[in-house]
Image: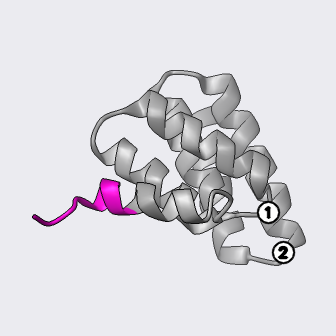
Amino acid sequence: MAITRLQYLNKLLEATPKDSFVLFALAKEHESAGDDMQSLSFYLRLKGNDPAYIGMYYHLGKLYERLEDFQNAILTYKQGIEISRNARDLHAMSELQSALLNLEDPE
């Protein structure tokens, strides 16, 4: 019997509980399954373990938007912009700035 992707990721997490990519993948997997609270918990765990993981900020901000927690979405985008600026990741910074602009001024 084949294991699901979620089961596989959970086995990886047991072996490497602080692996940023595994935490991100689990957050995305739960998000895809519609389990926003479980997704949020993995994003927040990732943010606590590895705040420099730039790719997380856009997705966490979008999740906050979907949950209608706009204050945390804005804060998350701003944090991501700062981190991506410090890392000189202009592509990520641009995506985060665009998401922030769309949230603050949707017209």
Name the mark nearer the viewer: 1 or 2. 1
When the figure is inspected, residue 62 is found, relative to residue 85, above or below; the finding is above
Is residue 98 visible in the rendered structure shown here?
A: no
Residue indicated by mark 1? 52
Mark 1 neighbour density, 10 Å: few (under 14) some (14–19) many (20 or more): some
Return the x and y of residue 93 as percentages of the image width and height. Answer: 71, 65
Return the x and y of residue 42 as percentages of the image width and height. Answer: 56, 43
**For residue 101, which quarter of the picture?**
top right
Query: Residue drawn at (61%, 56%), measured in percent from left and top?
Result: 56
When the figure is inspected, residue 77 is found, relative to residue 105, above or below; the finding is below
**For residue 96, which quarter of the picture?**
bottom right
Q: Are marks 1 and 2 in contact (CB under 8 Å)?
A: yes
Is residue 32 found left or right of 68 in the rendered image?
A: left
Q: Earlier in the sequence, mark 1 or mark 2?
A: 1
Return the x and y of residue 13 as percentages of the image width and height. Answer: 53, 58
**For residue 50, which quarter of the picture?**
bottom right
What sort of colour scheme is used for the picture? one colour
Q: Report the amino acid beneath label 2.
A: Ala
Is residue 84 visible in the rendered structure shown here?
A: yes
When the figure is inspected, residue 45 is found, relative to residue 72, above or below; the finding is below
Compute the Cα span from label 1 to label 2: 9 Å
Query: Residue drawn at (23%, 59%), measured in percent from left and top?
Result: 4
Query: Residue drawn at (35%, 33%), measured in percent from left and top?
Result: 35
Residue indicated by mark 2? 87
Front residue of 12/54: it is: 12
| Residue at the outermost right position | 86
Is residue 81 found left or right of 4 in the rendered image?
A: right
Which residues make up the magenta segment? 1-8
Q: Where does the N terminus fall, quadrant-wise?
A: bottom left
Secondary element at tag 2: loop
